[in-house]
Amino acid sequence: MNDKIDNQFTIWIDADGCPVVNSTINIAKQNSIPVIVVKNYSVQLKSDYAKIVTVDIARDSADYYIANNISTYDLVITQDYGLAAMVLAKKGFCINQNGKEITPSNIDFILDTRYHNKVSMMQNNRGPKHKKRSENDNLIYEKSLTEFINERILNKYK
C-alpha cells in the first residue's frame, strides 16, 4: 500500500452486485478522479473512463483484489462490510451503495448487526426483505458521494 502525499486518490468500485457503478464513474469523471472497477468475469461492463479489472468468479475475489491494491485515502464503494473493514484497516474510506459512509466508529456495529442478521436468517430460513431500488435512492447516493468528494477528500488533503 502506498501512502499518497499529494491530493490524488482513486475511487475503487466493488462491482459485484453494485447498482451505482455508472453514476460513480460519472461523478468521478466530472471531478477528474481515477476510477478502478473490479468485477468478476460474469459481469459485463465497459467504460471509456474507468479502468476495468476482471477477477475470477470465486467468492470474495474482487474484495481481496481491492484490499490488496488500495492506497491510503482511496475511496471504496462497496456493499460488502467485510471488505469495508479491510479498507478501513488500511486507512481507506468506504461508502455503501446507499451513500452511507462506513467508518472506524460504526464498522463494529455494522459487522455485529450483519452477524446477528445471518444467525436470525439461519434460524428462520428466510432472508431480509429488501425494497426495490428507486431513482430517489440513486439521487441520495449521488449527493452523498459528491459531498464526500468535496468535503472530506478534496478539502482535507489540499
Image (tube, grey):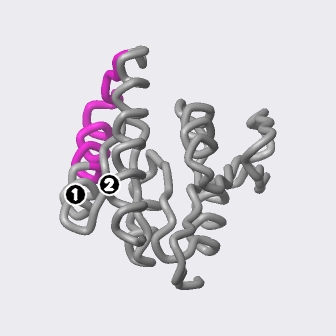
Q: Is 123 a magenta residue?
A: yes
Give the residue pinned by disc 1: 112
Tell whether 73 sits left or right of 64: left
Q: Residue at x 38, y 66 (%)?
A: 85
Quarter of the figure with residue 97: top left
N-terminal label among 1 and 2 = 1
Can you tell which mark lies on residue 152? Answer: none
- Quadrant containing the C terminus is bottom left
Magenta span: 114-131
Q: Residue at x 30, y 44 (%)?
A: 100
Of 66 and 154, which appears nearest the observer?
A: 154
Helix, strand or loop for disc 2: helix
User: In this rendering, is residue 45 above or below 135?
Assistant: below
Mark in the foreground, 1 or 2: 2
In the image, what residue type sits under mark 2?
Glu
Disc 2 marks which residue? Answer: 151
Q: Horizontal placement of 95 versus 23: left or right?
A: left
Relative to 122, does residue 139 appear above or below in the rendering?
Answer: above
Residue appearing at x 40%, y 15% in the figure: 134
Q: Report x, y in % for residue 23.
A: 56, 32
**Residue 117 drawn at (x, y percent):** 26, 43
Residues at badges 1 and 2 in contact (C-beta under 8 Å)? no
Q: What amino acid is at disc 1?
A: Asp
**x, y percentage for residue 147?**
34, 44
Which image quarter: residue 118?
A: top left
Check disc 1: other Cα within 10 Å, few if <14, some if 14-19, many if 20+. Answer: few
**In the displayed structure, does residue 104 sit left or right of residue 56?**
left
